Amino acid sequence: MARHLITSAIPYINGVKHLGNLVGSQLPADLYARYLRARGHEVLFLCATDEHGTPAELAAKKAGKPVAEYCAEMWQVQSDLAEGFRLSFDHFGRSSSPQNHRLTQAFAKALDEAGLIREVSETQMYSPTDGRYLPDRYIEGTCPNCGFDSARGDQCDNCTKQLDPVDLINPRSVISGATDLEMRETKHLYLRQSTMKDELEKWIDTREGWPILTTSIAKKWLTDGDGLQDRGITRDLDWGIPVQRGDEPWPGMEGKVFYVWFDAPIEYIACAQEWVDAGKGDDWQRWWRTDAGAEDVRYTQFMGKDNVPFHTLSFPATILGSAQPWKLVDYIKSFNYLNYDGGQFSTSRGRGVFMDNALEILPADYWRWWLLSHAPENSDAEFTWENFQTSVNKDLADVLGNFASRVTKFCRSKFGEEVPAGGTPGDLEAKLIADLTAKLREYDAHMEAIEIRKAASALRAAWVLGNEYLQEAAPWSTFKTDPEQAAMQIRLALNLIRLYAIVSQPFIPDASAQLREAMATDDAWPEDVSAALQTLPAGHAFTVPDVTFRKITDAEREDWQARFSGTRA
């Protein structure tokens, strides 16, 4: 048994997330956590809401609520949706927690003591129209590197080049669209990342097997142009973690807060403290401090590609720079973007399927299966309603659901609602066991390597093997001439339902629970396929499950396609 720490990129508090956000971090992290638990490993799976910065302030203002109240309400919304999608977090925390306040301020002190923070007098964009300084992300303009006309003040989403607002051509306020921006002098703290370039590059080179997407983005930030730049860690905002040097005031930084991208990753650690303080665990340090037992922990992070630079460079710079024995990430699973039906998901325009809408029209497993089996691992992927309908109807309804229904209903009609006795397995059964063993080994290998689409493909192929066996064995025909042989075939098929329920649980937990309940069985992982297919003995009672997956009609697909084309309030 190994110990696994898993974190998924923490979502912004400002609104319900769409399916592209979900598949880019939280959902694949949940898949991996569920798989590891099922294999007997000890897992701590953490996530939280990212509650600081201008996005939270603006969303609260739009909602007409104090920002703290708005964040508390939206945390509950996001927590409920996570539960609706069966995301199995051990704790879902908040970056605004007292634990994160203390830890962020403590990290700032440690970095300052290490000589890694410098105070900078700089000019910053100020919008007289908005009456405020504009954070980098709230200034847009044309990228001087690639010409993209919606580059943000901190980074171009098109070419990923790190930017400063003054680099932008024709900058404008995202808040009001105002172009009468002016530069005003202010003081800020900077993390001296540039002095750690060699150390960070050496550390990245020690990470084994990282996805090309992860390492290429990290290396680009390290070497492009003038290389890794120092990064501001404070902002002129009202809402956030007050700038302090540990428990002490920081002279000259009164009224400022830490930049959200400094405190947000630290919340991963603070979240573990929240987990303990909530009474869910008893020792967070054994997961996060190498001097308290975390040497044997394997730490895996999940995130979209836009978050990679901060997790490969800025957060490791914070950890390494503190000179304290914190656990560093071992593997970063990064994802490309999921696009929507010929375009992009758009939160601002309400284009695409959002998590709350998705659960209103279909149960979580339908979405989980499609999203994971089409995860944008090696390139951008696209959600289309036609593909979604086809995948649900063929994979879930026709292959898995139909198998469970046919077997249990046939058994009930010919043998009653208990596993029938009699018959002797032969060559056909031996071939099934051999083929299924090979396919499940392939499935395990892909899950261990976090190759999600390949794992889904192997799982579906395992379901198909059962259907092919059923077609060839044809117990409905066998029963007419050899009832005992038909009983053996059905006994094997009933055990197959149990096996499928268990190995499919990381992908489709609700369907797995339904089938395990119908088979009245445990959830022990089938290490040996031959033994697993004998787990339910003759005489074991079962019930016929309700329809596990229903088909999506053409009328439904057309209705949903029109509904989610850009009308969300």
Image (cartoon, grey):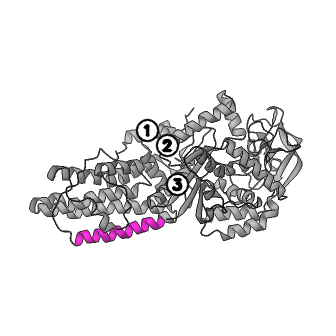
Q: Write the start and end of the magenta stretch as one range.
A: 427-446
122 in the magenta segment: no
**Which residue is the site of mark 3?**
28
- Tag 1: residue type? Ile
- Circle 3 Cα neighbour tier, 10 Å, few/some/many (<14 / 14–19 / ≥20): many
The answer to whether any part of residue 445 appears in the image is yes
Q: Which of marks 3 and 1 is in front?
A: 3
Which numbered disc, 2 or 1, marks the residue that appears first in the sequence? 2
Structural distance between the alpha carbons of marks 3 and 1: 22 Å
SS class of the residue under badge 1?
helix
- Tag 2: residue type? Glu
Q: How far from the left and from the top, in percent, is residue 415?
A: 15, 53
- Tag 3: residue type? Pro
Structural distance between the alpha carbons of marks 3 and 2: 15 Å
Q: Which of marks 2 and 1 is in front?
A: 2
Q: Nearer the viewer, mark 3 or mark 2?
A: 2
| In the rendered image, the vertical position of residue 246 relative to residue 64, given as above or below | below
Identify the mark at residue 83; answer none if there is no mark.
2
**Which residue is the site of mark 1?**
361
Determine the image quadrant of residue 72: top right
Of 10 and 212, nearer the camera is 10
Mark 2 touching mark 1, by CB under 8 A?
no
Mark 3 touching mark 2, by CB under 8 A?
no
135 relative to 569 in the view: left or right: right
Which numbered disc, 3 or 2, marks the residue that appears first in the sequence? 3
- Circle 2 Cα neighbour tier, 10 Å, few/some/many (<14 / 14–19 / ≥20): few
For the C terminus, the quadrant is top right
Q: How far from the left and from the top, in percent, is residue 320?
A: 74, 61
The answer to whether any part of residue 564 appears in the image is no
Q: How far from the left and from the top, in percent, is residue 191?
A: 80, 54
